[in-house]
Image: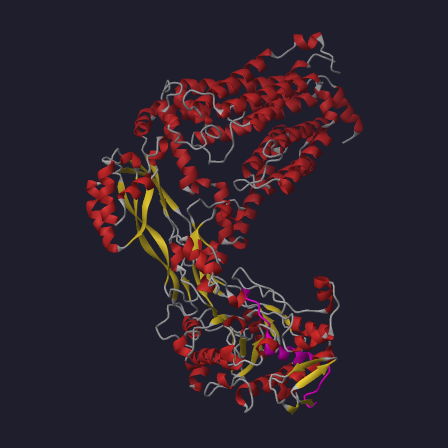
Amino acid sequence: MPIEEAGVGRLAAGVDLSIANRLIFIAVVIVLTFGVFGVRLFQLQVIEGEDLGNRARRNSVRTVHLEAPRGDILDRFGRELATTRPAFGVQVMPAEMRERELTFAALGSLLDQDPAELSEQVGSPRGRRRFQPVRVAKDLPYDSRTRVESHLYALPGVFTDVSPRRYYVGGSLAAHVLGYTGEIQTAQLEKRAFADYRSGDIVGQAGVESRYEEILRGRAGGRNVVVDVAGRVDEVLDEVEATPGGTLVLTIDRDLQQVAEDAFLPDVIGGEEKRGAVVALDPRNGDVLALVSRPSFDPNSFAGGIDSATWKELTESEGRPIQNRAVAGQYPPGSTYKVFVAAAGLEEGAITPEDRVFCPGTFKLGRRTYRCWKRGGHGSVNLHEALARSCDVFFYQLGLKLGIDRIAFFANGFHLGRKTGIALGVESPGLIPTQAWKERRFGEIWLKGETVSASIGQGFNLTTPLQLAVAYAAIANGGTVLKPRILLRHSGPDGTVEQGPEPESLGKVPVSPEHLATITRALEAVVHEPGGTGGRARVPGVRVAGKTGTAQVVHLKETEDLEEDEIPFKFRDHGWFASFAPVEAPEIVVVALAEHGGHGGSAAGPIVQAVLSRYFKSSMPEEPPRQTEPPKPLDPPEAPEEAAHVVRN
Amino acid sequence: MFGIDRRLLQNFDWMLLLLVVAIVGMGIINLASATHVDGELTGEVRRQLISLGIGGVAMLLVLAIDYRHYERFATPALLVCVALLAATLVFAPVTRGSQSWLFGGRLQPSELAKLGLVIALARYFHRNPPSEIRRLRDLMRPGLIVAVPVGLIVMQRDMGVALLTLLISSTYLAFTRIPWRSWVGVAFVGVATLITLWMFVLQPYQQRRILDVIDPGRDPLSSGYQAIQSRIAIGSGGLLGTGYRAGTQTQLRFLPTQHTDFAFSVLAEEWGFVGSCAVLSLYLMLMLWGLRIARNSKDGFGAMLAVGLVGTIFWPLVLNIGMVLGLAPVIGVPLPLFSYGGSALVTSLVGLGLLMNVSMRRYVF
């Protein structure tokens, strides 16, 4: 705009004609708008006024909340893991009660509750609150419900309702995968993510229930009704039906999950009930086939609100059933870690498969002596034998040759020391120590002796069972680190099906396929060769590769002279077993951890053996599936999967 | 500059003052009924009276300075508003899903931003007369002035206020000379883009979220309930109303936000068709008077300012009354000058102070 023109505009007195015309236009728009308001007011107040006025005098519009049933959660073959059942409740509307004492006495006997308590629960509210129904029973057994309903006519102000209630079909089965639901907490209500929730709403509080809340939740509906003085519905003003939540299809195989959980029970493996975790993955696509954490809990007990004693038991007791050990429990990996040190050694040229080391049973570094788990020593061993027999001395030397930072580089390459990103909420990152880490954390320099411990997975090293499964899956599939996947697909209430996340690669391991093959051969020897530490995981007809591990809880000195049974439980070692099968074309990775179970081979081996046996017995479900989906490989499948299993039987 | 000229007093706009006092007075009387408990003066009424005092003083201060000085400070003022909005995003806590209050809930920068924006736009359209805007691309620069604050308000998730700010700014479009077919083109492209986004890009859950914003009535438990209760309250008022503090719907507190967003339905129940028409007439007169001030102002800036200020009253009124009467979706927009709310009352009064300023200085050179 030219400056002169602007100047003229500013100097000119008054408003030019074009603007004046448009002002008139605006005035007309405003007057018309008010005209519309006036007509509408006349319609509402004068024409319909009397009718609406009558309605107001009865004060009788009531909103009925229609709770949406949560979506079902199914296993990979369409079998129910979590569903919804109706729960019958009883409510009291104080404003409509007639004979207070009598009503509570009758209700008390019908519900088997103390009438005084009921009376206290309802209280004697004043004003508008008298119209607010008070819930006195949430989930009645069928017979009490029919008793209450047959007496309703005599109990004005008392009414029953039905609301959907979460039901976990298998009780504690897959509890740590599914999570649980509960009423939304006050702290959650203030968060933006829960902006459209109201107090009393049911919300997923852990696991898949929480992670996929948005899909599962559905939409509550409502009904605005006009009720008469006795509380009977006169007229439904409007209604929006509740929309049920979408169905989740998980990657979990219910049978395999059951077998993996049962493997911790005393009648399956003998001895006392074990604590620990199992993770079973499909190394071709990262599907989580089973994920177990023991001890477990029954998420059904949360569905109707949980009492504080039970909650305390779940969260604070020594076993802490609520904790998901498979993804959040961090343990020293023990000898299962040796494969990563071996990979580092091969890849860095620190050792060849032919090189031999003599193991006399001890290893001296400075003034300290480190022992091999086998007191007599292994004699002369190469890499293959050292892995198969889990020789410590071999790896002490290899580790020192590599140095801690190069070991850490390769461990990180297998995604250890980082979260896997599984869609289950709480996850621990584990820990792969380096010189820089120790400097940062303790302000101290790294000691060579610490490299010795780290080489056999002790010392500062920490991994979760899931991390170890992901790392072993990378060995099994030729070097791809896959993000563990828990959601296969989900569907909305309208029947549309959406696939879950595609198999996602977190990177390639920095190890050549040739070296991975060398390691795999050694892992097969662990299970199948005489002298191997993992014979307990053998499955007839299947080539299984695996590695045992024993994570020390306290230093050897205090317990070395005791027999396993004599060591106090909490000081006993954790037993690991990491495996995959079949060796020629791996389909399943199973990692088991037996907390305080003692040696990996004997404590965790049978758990792995149980899971693998079940998997190879039949990977098809016994009952007819609702929906079937073959496991989705990352690469195009070479042969139909199911056919392969049948042949193997 | 601060000296009170005798001519100013002679030209004092008594009519405007009278209208404002009448509307605010009715609002406070209504508030006393809506929040009435056992005949005492409630905290809400007391707080609203304090806000009225603050607003009155602010109005006088705004009045004392010739409005032409505001033109010079338009840009810095807008920048301050934008900075406050940005600060809100960083510092303010999230309440009820949106995040729009500063200083422990004493200041709502989005309210202030509406005034800042009107002053800035008045300056812009004074220097670039809107009658010369003939092509859509001429709207780029004023569009940018509007987009920044509106964008920040959207980021605070305060969709109601964002929409309102857009509507207020759109008042100036009435002066432009952009041909109808350009608007048809804009509408066509806009609708086509929205449909494409909706069908091919947005996930179902995102679609649901958008529907919830556009039409909260989808959830009949909160807003649908209010809309129905509001209609019943208005209807039960009839021709002459139930009488002050005698509205059954109101006194039984069936409307959860009856002293803020649904204040007008309380008025309609207790004062009937006659009373609500009377209050609406006051608003109509106020706005036509504002347009008269624009017509008579001595320069383009004054005219543009006055029109924008009329817009700041008109648009929230349309959204609020439309909602209360069941003609518009339930968006939480209070009725200006009438609903309970200190920050809004003070800014409204400051805006009207500006309008009075333009009015009083129409003959002064």
Name the quadrant containing residue B76. Answer: top right
Which of A431 and A636 lies nearest the eye of the viewer? A431
The answer to whether any part of residue B135 appears in the image is no
Q: In the rendered view, tell whether residue A489 sits above or below residue A305.
A: below
Name the residue located 32 percent from the left edge and 26 percent from the top edge. A53
Task: Quadrant for residue A22, please give it.
Answer: top right
| Quadrant placement of the N terminus of chain A | top right
Q: Quadrant of residue A512?
A: bottom right
Vertical placement of residue B77 versus A410, above or below? above
Q: In this picture, which residue range is highlighted in magenta?
A: A328-355
Q: Is residue A166 above or below residue A584?
A: above
Provide residue B156's location: percent of width, then percent of height: 59, 41
Name the spot of residue A113 as percent of width and height, x first.
27, 48
Residue B163's x, y, as percent?
A: 56, 36
In the image shown, does B125 or B309 lie closer to the viewer? B309
Q: Is residue A80 visible?
A: yes
Residue A344 lies in the magenta-colored region: yes
Number of numbered discs visible in the structure rendering: 0
